[in-house]
Image (cartoon, rainbow, N blue to C red):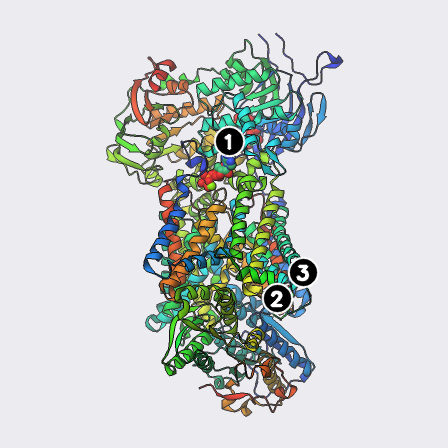
Amino acid sequence: MTTNLQTGPVPGGRTAPPALEVRGLVKHYPGVKALDGVDLVVHQNEVLGLAGENGAGKSTLLKALVGLVRPDAGEIWVRGERVRLRSVVDAANHGLGMVFQEQSLVPNLTAAENIVLGSEGPGVRRGIYHWRTMRRLAQEQLDKIGSHIDPLARTDSLSFADRQMVEIAKVLRIEERTSHPPVIILDEPTSVLESKEIETLFTQVRRLREFASVVFVSHRLDEVLDVCDRVAVLRGGRSVGEVPAAGAAPAELHRMMIGSTGSDDHYHDGLAERSEEPGRPRLVVRGLSGRTFRDVDLEVRAGEIVGIVGVHGSGREDLCRALFGAEATTAGEVQLDGERLDLSGTRAACAAGIGYVPAERKTEGMVGPMSVADNMTLTKQQARCSGPLVRPRKQATLVDTWIERLSIRTPHRGTAIQRLSGGNQQKVVLARWLVSGDVRLLLLDHPTRGLDIGARSEVYRLMRELAGSGVATVLLADSLEEAIGMSDRIVVMSDGRATTEIAAPSGGKPTPLDLVKEMV
Amino acid sequence: TETAAGGGAAGGDVASGACDPADVTLVGQVRNESNPYEASWLDGGDAFAEQVGLTQERLTYDGDSTRQQEQISQLLAGDTECLVMNILPNGDSDTPPIVEGAEAAGAYLVTQWNKPADLNVADYDSWLSHITYDGVESGRQIGDALAEAIGGSGGIVALQGILDTGAAKDRFAGLEESLAGNPDVELLDDQTANFSRAEALEVTKTLLTKHGDDIKGIWAANDDMALGALEALQQAGRDDVAVVGIDAVPDALTAIEEGTMTATVSSDGPWQGGIGLAIGYCVATGELAVEDIAADDRAWFAEQFLIQQDNVADFVSPETSEADFACDNLFSRSQGAIS
Amino acid sequence: MTSPAEADTEVVQARRPQPRRGVSLRDAGPPIALVVVFGVFAALSPGFRTLSNVQNVLDAAAVLAVVTIGISFVLMMGSIDLSAPGIMGASAITVALLVANNRNDNDLGFVGIAVAVLLAAGLGCLSGLALVLLKVPSFMATLGVSAVGLGLATLLFAGVQPNIADPMLEGWAVERFLGLAHLTWIALGCVLLGWLVQRYSRLGRYAFAIGGAEEVLALSGVRVAPYKVAVFTLAGAFYGLAGVMVTSQLSAGLVQAGRGYDFSAITAAVVGGTLLTGGRGGILHSTVGVLLVTVLTNGLVQVGVSPYWQGGVQGLIVVAAVAAAVIPQRRRNQVTK
Amino acid sequence: MSTPVLAQPASDAPVVARPTVGQRLTSFMPVIALVVLLAALTVVDPGFFTLSSLTAAVRTAAPLVVLAAGATVVVLCGGIDLSIAALCSLATVFFALWLPDLGGLTTLAIVAVAGAIGALQGVAHVLLRIPSFIVTLGGMSIFSAIALVISDAGPIPVSDRGTTHWLTLYVAGVLPMAFVVALVVVAVVSLVLRLTPVGSWVRAIGYSESAARLAGSPVDLVKVGAFTLSGACAGLAAVMLVSRNFSGSPTMADNLLLPAVAAIVVGGTAITGGHGSLWRSLAGALVVTLLRVGLPIVGVPSAYEQILYGAIIVAAVALTLDRSKVLIIK
Ligand SMILES: Nc1ncnc2c1ncn2[C@@H]1O[C@H](COP(=O)(O)OP(=O)(O)OP(=O)(O)O)[C@@H](O)[C@H]1O
Ligand SMILES: Nc1ncnc2c1ncn2[C@@H]1O[C@H](COP(=O)(O)OP(=O)(O)OP(=O)(O)O)[C@@H](O)[C@H]1O
Ligand SMILES: [Mg+2]
Ligand SMILES: [Mg+2]
């Protein structure tokens, strides 16, 4: 097979012009070159995968394609015509629509309103809402993706996955907007979905290919290769190449992304380094009950990683929050290293040596406008203070060390964390619990959500390293594979109860199927 | 650390004013220009200033004590050599700092309405005079007029002014005196409506539902509230209730003329605006020496009249004549010293 | 660049709720508080529970209701509006000078009222423009506009109280229909109008959405600036009408017609369940809040609480009512600002 | 199998994020606004720009600076304190009542009690989860009522002026002591915020309270602390007012609420929390004071004064707010 890195319109009218073409796109941010001359071609009726490390510039590129980022240089061509995209509406009129990496729905509106937002068409006539029409328009979109959500439900009362479906239904409104075949851009749509929902999504993507082009971003390379026709790779803001999906291996893609080889079975990296002997029980939970979980017993030994799996609504997230003192409990007792744990608040939990990485990074994990350094040292003041006073020098050294150790891509420790790519933000959040070196129990809620393979391996390595040094870890994994790969033991929760426990030693890992059977 | 006197021309010998009449600066300060009484006060000041060929600097502080103090200290930080101030302090507590400031800067000061009882004008050189109306007397006068209007017996309600002002307290004390003299008149309720027409409207409505036909009369600590009460009565379709107020604002006089309101007590805004400046001007230009002002004229009650339907015509257009402000006639309206 | 979906805290709190339509239990706090407060006063004071006092309470709520409806749209957007005193003052004086009055020969009647409301809408629009064009936070923009309004009113006032002689405008406060003053019916009409706008107009729903997640609207290609300006303009118009209503009640145009209405309206809206952070509540919530506040004011007089204490007791009850209303929704990691 | 074409990725040398000239300028905007206003007033009335006039202006501004400084920390935490003015009035009454008994200790007692009252509001806010706007609005009316009742609805004269005399002195003959105290308050609080972790906690809470809490920051403690400081500052401002007015009165400071909040916003502190500083509020308070006293003194008629005041504070905020820090303006 040959590589086709196209840099211009196909001469001689061999075929129709590509649906979308990008030439030499450049975008600078203070201190970062997010895009450094990206070239990209999306053909009609194809699904193009876009891969690249965290911070490679994928989101920036895609935002430029829907008019949200004004590029410093470069050209965008849509169906053989050069366009300047000034706004989302502009882009939509050219048939370009996007599902954003971070969810972008208005929480207090109905699903129907969100779906038609900005392009209500007959749903709003002369500024007056026609709820029936609105509902019908939304229902049409929801039917397309086979979702059974009530269009008049308030969006904030929907589950995360349902909201994702609403987003997809919303972007499909593009079809209604232009007569041309649209280009639908999906920026990491799967990172928060479960396997069943992912399947639905992929069915949609394949359906879309019949009449549209799709750009698809994901850090799960197997997924990318599964659903895409072709995969383009970005690195450091540049296009570094592309491969046809058919027959390509994740390892190959990975090599292009980071410039060296890596393996896809990274879950098992470094397994050998683990000591096989978990220590004494560190966390002991007895009959803990809360709003969404009941009578949970759980034990985690020092140096052990325990995965908790369960579907949405199983109560595992609230259990984690309760252990961290961020959710009220109604009954039960928790001991840490034999001492009764104070569950009255997050501060007590931190003081006891518990660390928590929340799933909602953007609102709960980090303080966007504050610097990387401040975010990293927000919890452990002894890490940056001598006595009551902050020591900027000490803080700087410490933060720089961790930026180095976790290879966090940031222009400077003083950069606002919101300017980092998602993966790098996550590393900072993790680093928060590591800087002081006194954490005994880590509660990780989807710690690898949105991370690229490299960062993921890094996080895995870190987790193992920490486990090796005796830290007990509770892991709510991104996928069953991750749970299986990383955990020593897996607890299955359903309906608020811990129902089963499955051992997963490095020799005898269960299969995902084994788990699914227990979960439902 | 050392002490500095805040002012420019500090502590001169103020008693012997020797300013060129053209050099005198006239300042009148009231709460705001958005109520008719105080606007007419400033207009009276303008009229006096014109009379002596000067202009008056009009200051307003929007009923905000701190802002009044701020303006005065800023004013006193400028040229105070021939400064004459006719001030309406926002409350009793605002008077001492104004007086002290003026004394330190050597500016000629006349205050009106509000003064703590224990602050003695004669202790100061540049605080020339304090003028007020006898609130207890006015409160009692309209109380009596009200009692008479309802035939000497029956229930009344009182609308008090801003509770922490001396005027509100004095006037209410006057009402209590009147009640003592009219044992058959019963005070059913007293509420505050903060001297405000709109608040008086709401409070009166509520009192009307609470006490119903028992209310025969409404005693209001000023005309604005009385007018609000009149509106409430009109809206409730009651025309059997007598209403009294204080201040003689034009609308109240009209209401008395028409017979909807029973009585008010005159306060003469234009005269007040002129007289304060006139006293200061006469002292500043040397036509009057501070030591020549009689002790009784340093703090005095100005003449006031109970206005009822029979004499209202005399007050509809209050007039001040130039003669009122002549240097030898300044204290002609005195009803005696404030005891 | 705005980041997409600063995902509203609501999203975070509502972790795994049941899909939900329309009204929910968490809205029930303020109405319950209203019923309780009403019940307590009715038990304590025979004067309170008379029909005429209930009419009186409704009449007394009229102006506050109109102001609160206006402010609710602004609060829904997550902005704040302190311009009511200035705008009401300007409109009160304007209408008093345009209808039959004792200062000039104007007798424009209904047109005068319309002009006053338009002027008020214009002042409201000014707040909106300062917000979206100069990017001045609404707190300051509206405070500035309030000062401008008071200045205009003082200029027009010119030292002489304009008293109105227009029979229609005077009649609004005096004449009754089904036991309620015309002004009260006007206020009820405003409640209905506000509710329809909130529920069935793009302006209302977008105001709601702006409070929920402004950035998302931009991502969806909605230009929020015009809607913000429109909301402030609408609010201004409501304040203007309220100014006219005060003028009708007092038969005179007062510069201070709107004094204190800014904070009472915000209190009423918040007591009714509108969040100052935006995105929750609405006209009906605010109406309940207005009734609660008015019942309190009236009840404290009826019960005979000393005027010295009334303000304090009212403050205490407001805090207690809000506390009671939020207790059922209290969560560990809840954000309260 | 294909051979992917590999291009060389750009080596991204770490760039140190230095503030640009523009960014530096925005942080000086409050001062620039102040200077511009002063210049404008001087142009209108050259007599305004004299040493004694400026001295009077900063002396006047002192209580406002202190009030605004305390409330700024609450605003930085994302809340608001509407009770400062009423609490300050109440504190003036306390001062006048207690002075005969406590003598020289009165000042300390007032600051402590006002701080404790502030703390009480903070506790109500964090424990009951009532928005600070409501708690402090309630506080405002409750404090007013208490002040009215205990003062018997009238001013209470302070005859012993010795206790507050020091506040009326001048440093080096020109700098009013009250203003120096205000500067010290601003400086000390700023330093505490800067040199201890409290500063980043405050900002974290202001920007994102839930993230701060999940990072184990002492959110509730810091908030209660902010309200305590705000209350204590109201107490200190009360002492300054008493030193100026020789009496305590139940409504003395009531009208300082909006100017104090205006000072904070004019300084460029985001009313939504997170971004801002006490120095900005200091400049803001001076701007507001100049507007309050300057406009009438240079001879602007009352009606136009209000219009100008409105226009200028809006313009000042337009100038001072750093929009790169505050993405969404509500
Ligand atoms: N608004 C911004 N201001 C400054 N820098 C930015 C901004 N947005 C993105 N960047 C920088 O541009 C680079 C590219 O970011 P981008 O979000 O496009 O990465 P990405 O490939 O989508 O990463 P991820 O897989 O983590 O989502 C990163 O280094 C990021 O820090
Ligand atoms: N069939 C319909 N007809 C009219 N309006 C509808 C319909 N369905 C939904 N809506 C709109 O959707 C809204 C649902 O959200 P709404 O804002 O009312 O929620 P809420 O429960 O009142 O929220 P909150 O508790 O925040 O006040 C309805 O209030 C209404 O405005
Ligand atoms: Mg991205
Ligand atoms: Mg609702």
Q: Of marks 3 and 2, which one's residue comes earlier in the chain?
A: 3
Q: Is residue B134 left or right of residue B287?
A: left
- Is the N terminus of chain D in the top left, top right, bottom left or bottom right quadrant? top right
In whole angstroms, how far apart are the C-alphas of marks 1 and 2? Answer: 53 Å
Q: Quick check: C245 above or below C201?
A: below
Q: Tell me if label 3 and label 1 are in contact, CB under 8 Å.
A: no
Residue C326 location, x and y as percent?
38, 45
Chain label for disc 1: A
Q: Amino acid at mark 3?
A: Leu
Residue A431 to residue D35: above or below: above
Using the image, name the chain to which the residue with label 2 belongs. Answer: C
Pointer 2 residue? C165
The answer for how far apart the CA atoms under marks 3 and 1 are is 48 Å
Say which residue label 1 marks: A111
Q: Is mark 3 within 8 Å of ligand 2?
A: no
Figure quadrant of residue B282 = bottom right
Q: Is residue A400 visible?
A: no
Q: Position of residue D226 (x, y in %)?
A: 42, 52
Location of residue D132 in the rendering, given as x and y in whole percent from the top left corner: 43, 51
Q: Nearer the viewer, mark 3 or mark 1?
A: 3
Across and down, in percent, residue B222 comes to 50, 74
For the residues marked 3 and 2, what is the alpha-carbon distance in whole angstroms? 11 Å
Residue found at the very far front of the displayed protein: C178
Q: Which residue is mark 3?
A: C108
Q: Of the residues shown, which amino acid type is indicated by label 1?
A: Ala
Question: Which amino acid, by three-letter code, is at mark 2?
Answer: Ala
Q: Dot 3: what SS?
A: loop
